[in-house]
Amino acid sequence: MHGAHTNRLRSSGGVRLELTPTTTSPLSIDTSESTEMRIQRLITENPVIIFSRSSCCMCHVMKRLLSSLGVHPTVIELEEDEIHALSVSVPDGGEEAETVAPAVFIGGARVGGLESLVGLHLSGHLVPKLVEVGVLVL
């Protein structure tokens, strides 16, 4: 595939595929799309998505919790200069959370960081929310 230059096995068991901008690939990256627009697009396109920093242990715990429920979220690792765009693109209009990344979104709504995700699970509201967005069938 033109545009893919690195394919590395990750310690978390996933594969990281790094894409370079190209106009000949159907998977081309729109270089005119701002970071904020890209983050917002990803939030709307993916029912469960986690934005993380590289090698984030809290993101790993979030993925394990969701995997144990049978849900496999999309995980996007942001570069340090992209982290600020995550707070800008939060659509709920509320105050910014102290922890910008990692952040999980379910059904387009920001859940928050690891503490919020675990709290949602312990309160019994996580599974119904995952069923509601169609990623989990009971």
Image (cartoon, helix red, strand yellow):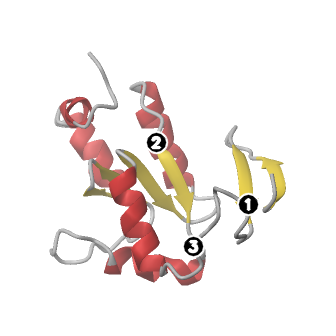
- Mark 2 lies on a secondary structure that is loop
Marks 3/2 in contact by CB < 8 Å: the verdict is no
User: What's the CA distance linking mark 3 and mark 2?
Assistant: 23 Å
Taking the spot 56% from the left edge, 84% from the top edge, the residue there is 81
Q: Where residue 23 appears, x then y in whole percent?
A: 70, 70
Which is more toward the observer, 133 or 20?
20
Q: Earlier in the sequence, mark 3 or mark 2?
A: 3
Give residue 124's quadrant in the image.
Answer: top left
- Mark 1 lies on a secondary structure that is strand
Task: For label 1, count other residues whose C-alpha is less than 10 Å away and answer few (under 14), some (14-19) or many (20+).
Answer: few
- Mark 3 lies on a secondary structure that is loop
Taking the spot 65% from the left edge, 64% from the top edge, the residue there is 28
Q: Where residue 49 appears, x then y in whole percent?
A: 42, 51
* Disc 1 residue type (three-letter): Glu
Q: Please name the residue that numbered disc 2 is placed on.
A: 73
Q: Please name the residue that numbered disc 3 is placed on.
A: 30
Q: Where residue 103 appears, x then y in whole percent?
A: 39, 60
In the picture shown, does residue 36 fall above or below 116? below
* Disc 3 residue type (three-letter): Asp
Q: Quick check: can you spot residue 74?
A: yes
Q: Earlier in the sequence, mark 3 or mark 1?
A: 1
Q: Please name the residue that numbered disc 1 is placed on.
A: 18
In the picture shown, does residue 3 fall above or below 21? above
Placement of the C terminus among the 4 image quadrants:
top left
In the picture shown, does residue 42 fall above or below 127? below
Task: For label 3, count other residues whose C-alpha is less than 10 Å away and answer few (under 14), some (14-19) or many (20+).
Answer: few
Marks 2/1 in contact by CB < 8 Å: the verdict is no
